[in-house]
Amino acid sequence: MSPLIPASSTARLRSIDALRGLVIVIMLLDHVRETFFLHHQVSDPMDVSATDPALFFSRLLAHLCAPVFVFLTGVSAWLYGAKAGSRGAAAAFLAKRGAFLILLEIVVVNFAWTFQFPPSVIYLQVIWVIGLSMLALAALLWLPRAALVVIGVLLVAGHNALDGVHVAAGEFMHVPWAVLHDRGWIQVGDALRLRTSYPLLPWIGVIALGYAVGPWFQARVPAAVRQRRLWAAGIAALAGFVVLRMLNGYGQAQPWAVQDDALHTVMSFVNITKYPPSLMFLLLTLGLGLCLLVLIERAQTAAWVGVLCVFGAAPMFFYLLHLYVLKALYLAGEGVWGLNQGKFFGVDSMASIWLISVLLAVALYWPVRWFGRLKAARRDIFWLKYL
């Protein structure tokens, strides 16, 4: 999640930070929803017939976050190795940072969600899967670039062929399969369960493809060439999504269907599975992400790009900070107003969720900017680069 390279004034690297910052702010919206809209929780995939469009599309927007984070982590890993002049340096950093993220998910992030110690449930979510993906990339980056592309495409496009493979609890391979592909529960003793919310296999494919794209961001590659490649790849992914989704075949378990009106038909068409991310999910989100990367690079001098770069230069700090701020706000609201939504404290509309998200983004901008400047100034403090 955190950039593997320092912030740069060049457009190619500013675009990476800015896109990372954009999806962080979108992630904030989704986590505000998960904090103050629990009384309107949605399933995955979302039930088009029962979900309000404002909630549906807000949740759909958040689908951009994880694929873009993982893809840009791969890009940044290549750039880190290029700057160090060694794939070994990139592999070593990926291994250390990956292990750090796994520990962070289990100890710090999970506590922010559950506020329970010792925990009875540990949710292995996006930080966990980024950490595991980094460990996998540390091994895979020694392969030729062409081999990385093949592996990435096979994992992204082929993992849905394994959707029918399930291993019951207690059987051989249940634990590794729950981690790799089949989202499920792992029982650890009598008092602790693990929830593998983000199955790993497709995410290895995403980070591998990001690493393979890394050379497009070399300083000697003309901006027009890079943008043309990114644009072509993004449009190809989006076109692939439209064609394959129209066919209602491979790549998404839930077929789409014509609904009572055009809006709900569109909702059905873009109702895609995140856990694990289906081929349709990754084609749509990565396609949009690549196109956004081009648009942001072309708008490098805009003030909003600079604002997004502030968030994108210190994303892990932002991630941890916003989780604990949201938990504190929820407990404060519950203490002042009580459980005003049945078993939960919350707000009544998605408009309120958007408003809270905007206000929080503004409030968190300043501490994130402070930390980003500290991180850039104090290169002598080694642990800062892990945040």
Image (tube, rainbow, N blue to C red):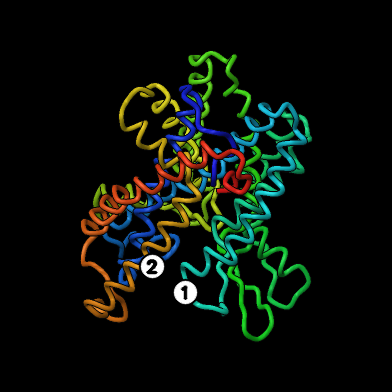
Give the amino acid type for the residue marked by disc 1 in the picture. Phe
Residue sitting nearer the eye, 365 or 257: 365
Q: Relative to residue 132, is residue 231 depicted above or below? A: above
Query: Which secondary structure, mark 1?
Result: loop
Residue sitting nearer the eye, 250 or 80: 80
From the image, tell me which residue sits under label 1.
115
- Count the labels in the image: 2
Q: Relative to residue 309, is residue 163 depicted above or below? A: below
Q: Can residue 258 be seen in this view?
A: no
| Residue lying at 59% horizontally and 34% vertically, measured from the top left | 75
From the image, tell me which residue sits under label 2.
327
Name which of mark 2 and mark 1 comes first in the sequence. Answer: 1
Q: Are the two marked residues, 2 and 1, in contact with CB atoms closer than 8 angstroms? A: yes
| Residue lying at 54% horizontally and 56% vertically, measured from the top left | 126
Residue sitting nearer the eye, 272 or 349: 349
Query: Residue 307 location, x and y as percent?
Result: 35, 36
Query: Residue 65 location, x and y as percent?
Result: 46, 47
Give the amino acid type for the residue marked by disc 2 in the picture. Lys
Q: Can residue 295 be seen in this view?
A: yes
Query: Which secondary structure, mark 2?
Result: helix
| Residue lying at 62% horizontally and 80% vertically, measured from the top left | 192
**Quadrant in the rendering for residue 297:** top left
Query: Residue 66 location, x and y as percent?
Result: 50, 49
